[in-house]
Amino acid sequence: MKYLLSIETTCDETAAAVIGEDLSVLSSVVASQDRLHERFGGVVPEIASRAQVERIVPVIDEAIRRAGVRLEDLKAVAVAHTPGLAGSLMVGLMAAKTFALVLEVPLIAVNHLQAHVYACRLSSGEEVFPCVGLVVSGGHTSLYHCPSPLEFRLLGNTIDDAAGEAFDKVASMLGLGFPGGPVVEKAALQGDPKAYDFPRSMLEDRTRLDFSFSGLKTAVRYAITGPGKFDFGSVPLSPKQVADLAASFQEAVVDCLVGKALLALEMTGLRTLCVGGGVAANRRFRERLQAEADRAGIRLFIAPLKLCTDNAVMGAIAWERYRAGLFETLDLDIAPGPIRPLKSRSEPGSVPSSACRT
Ligand code: KG4
Ligand code: ZN
């Protein structure tokens, strides 16, 4: 049996896993930084990359130790090199290149968002492609047409905030802590999802598969402070208000995600939906999606809870690239993500090379 080492450092988790070519998971280690970012209400890139440097070696060591494999049993090294925070990505990539060089094994590039979708293939053990892939995380809300594990075509994206980011910001407004998703979900259990009539931006537009969550975030803010006001300090909220705001916000996000996912299936004619990313851990979202999928006769795969948030196991998608002979040279660079170009400096739609490279 061949094994590969998978490394994931795209944001604030340092993760490593050893995975067999039959997709068996020999070990998975995830070091979370939630505690370091808690008091800022969001991930601070500089803190994240410094913590990645401290943790990467012990995390990889532990993954190899738990797997019980010898270094020479590792036949490839996979690393998530896009998208993510530049400093964090660089740490994982340097570690992976070092391994590839020293062990003289192929280096395989993993797209973190594609890996989130692949978590469904991994956990179900079933052939899930071709499918529509929905990735709902802290940095991304994206729909893909995925004909095969090697082809991902973007169908739609958030035009502003990601769904997870909106959960994190709303949690901070409600004084609930970080990361926002789990605490908003918990507060929402006691609330009325119809208490506030929050906007479902772009849901009515059946010609586009994009999302927008910044208007919803502002609507929650104004529901707390009053229209046009930004000062939270003088606005005490009762536990009932917090619960109702959380439940109404969550319901609006879920409506948008479910609505656009179903529209993507309709537009592509596909009957399989794979969902991954941190927000896919949300129970209300999972229940609503399952109910809609059952009603519409859609094959639905949602990543299991432990594979929703960032981990290196989903880097198993690298075996698909291994089989296709898609290896990288040591020139492989990080690609932090789509940075919108300044219109005045470049052609519309073009991304300056300096924006994606460091
Ligand atoms: O995929 P992930 O671990 O990291 C990124 O790639 O961004 O996603 C993290 C995001 C955070 O914004 C977090 O608040 C959100 O996933 N999240 C949730 C839940 N658990 C985590 N959002 C809603 N409900 C949850 N239960
Ligand atoms: Zn992620």
Image (cartoon, grey):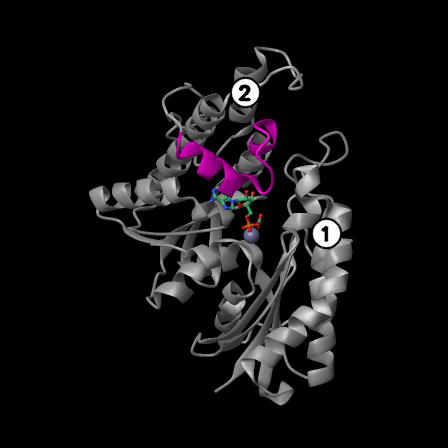
Q: Residue at x 64, y 82 (%)?
A: 105
Task: Name the residue nearer the viewer: 10 or 331.
Answer: 10
Q: Amino acid at mark 1?
A: Ala
Vertical relation: 269 (above or below) 189: below
Q: Residue at x 42, y 26 (%)?
A: 248
Residue position for label 1 = 48
The answer to whether residue 62 is left or right of residue 287 is: right
Vertical relation: 11 (above or below) 67: above
Q: Are marks 2 and 1 in contact (CB under 8 Å)?
A: no
Image coords of residue 156 (percent x, y): 48, 40
Instruction: Name the secondary structure under disc 1.
Output: helix
The answer to whether residue 352 is left or right of residue 20 is: right
Image coords of residue 226 (percent x, y): 57, 11
Task: Name the residue nearer the viewer: 294 or 190.
Answer: 190
Instruction: Name the secondary structure under disc 2.
Output: loop
Residue 161 placement: quadrant:
top right
Q: Residue at x 52, y 71 (%)?
A: 321
Is residue 298 highlighted in magenta? Answer: no
- Spot the residue most to the front: 239
Q: Which residues are magenta?
A: 171-190
Task: Name the residue nearer the viewer: 207 or 71.
Answer: 71
Q: Circle 2: is it few (<14), some (14-19), or many (20+) Cα within 10 Å?
A: some
Task: Name the residue nearer the viewer: 106 or 181.
Answer: 181
Q: Considering only order in the chain, which callout, 1 or 2, is on the residue closer to the N terminus?
A: 1
Vertical relation: 79 (above or below) 137: below
Residue position for label 2 = 237
Mark pair 2, 1: CA separation = 32 Å
The answer to whether residue 108 is left or right of residue 119 is: right
Vertical relation: 318 (above or below) 290: below
Q: Nearer the viewer, mark 2 or mark 1?
A: 2
Q: Amino acid at mark 2?
A: Leu
Does residue 12 show up?
Answer: yes
